[in-house]
Amino acid sequence: MVGCIGSLDEVDVAGASLEEGRAEGALESRDGSGDDAAPGGSTSAPTLACAPLCNGSCTPIDLATVNTNGALQIALTDQYVYYGGGYGSEVGDDEVGRVPKAGGAKSILIDRLTYVTELVGSGPYAYFAGSGPGLGSKLNRVNPDGTITALPIAGGYPSGVAVDSTRIYWIGNNRYDIYARPLSGGTPSVVVPRGGGLRTSLFEDGDSLYYREIASSGIMTAPKSGAAAPTRFIPRLTWYLDFDEANVYYAANGVYRMPKSGGTPVQLATGGTRVVVDNERIYWLDGTALRAMCKDGTGTQVLASTGEHYDLAVDGTGVYWAGEGKIRKIAK
């Protein structure tokens, strides 16, 4: 990949305000919003020497045309880009489909759904929370051959779904307990009992779960083992998180980085609404463009112009998003 290369010496870097795509270097910035960012806050990030992606001029590839009249989610598996939703107010017309990451024909796997609210990928499988005819459960697994397997759940409709190598987790909207069930089968169990009411947007990383809790006005974290009570981790609400070995990244009208061990969030860019990371770079959408920068705050690029705010994913071969009625990819 033409991208970031270099040593992994640790340095204190706060990134830069990159709304115009012009700032470079490693600067600390804040948006003045309460305790979310503070002067002097820093997070360790690798020192990298960056070369532009796509030799500085990226050309998006259109993988599929989709209906983006409403909310559309995308998720990656080993071979496919999955999408779910897409029809907004046209009740009963949502669908789950997929297109090969390498390009090829789009497949609609199930349609005429009342809604699809959660979609995640792991290894060869995709998982979605949805409601409609033909579904054996409100939480389902899509197998590599395109068949759909119903997963027994408890606690009501899932308001958040996450999956790791051994278990699937969801928030049951009856009481907002967080449940887990082995991927190999078995009985669901509560791993995080109900707390401050409404919970949504579940994420997992390592030994921890992260989720939005409205009453706490922030992102909570709790161990997957259930051995300790949840704690308030990020001091504001955000819909999307991503992780690398040391840090949590989130978007909340800006792009932020925070150590997994806790500490002061550091603002990396303004205007961000969705952020994902890989081993080398940070990628984000801000409603005008898909942007990227290396993790030391340098090498900022506009990868593509797009009005999309939310649907973004990355793997070792490309960056993917849904916008302008298409699922699109920039090859690395």
Image (cartoon, helix red, strand yellow):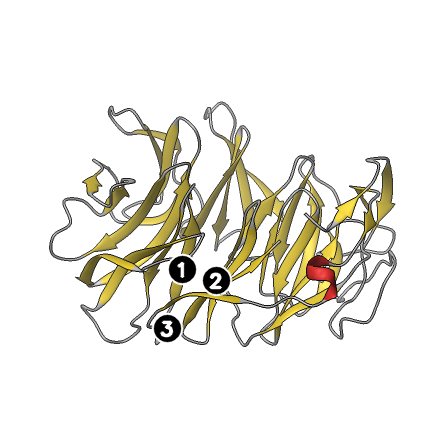
x and y percentages locating residue 115 in the rendered image: 25, 62
Left/right placement of residue 239 relative to residue 40 reads left
Q: Secondary structure at mark 3?
A: loop
Earlier sequence position, callout 2 versus callout 3: 3
Q: Amino acid at mark 3?
A: Thr
How much space separates mark 2 and mark 1, taking CA atoms?
6 Å
- Tell me where residue 188 sits by quadrant: top left
Q: Amino acid at mark 2?
A: Asp
Q: Which residue is mark 2?
A: 311
Left/right placement of residue 122 relative to residue 17 reads left
Q: Secondary structure at mark 1?
A: strand
Earlier sequence position, callout 1 versus callout 3: 3
Q: Is residue 102 above or below residue 86?
A: above
* Front residue of this view, candidates 60 and 222: 60
Marks 2/1 in contact by CB < 8 Å: the verdict is yes
Left/right placement of residue 241 relative to residue 246 reads left
Q: Secondary structure at mark 2?
A: loop
The tag on residue 73 is 1
Please rate how many residues cluster around mark 1, counting C-alpha atoms within 10 Å: few if below 14, some from 14 to 19, many from 20.
many
The tag on residue 248 is none
| Residue 217 appears anywhere in the view | no
The tag on residue 68 is 3
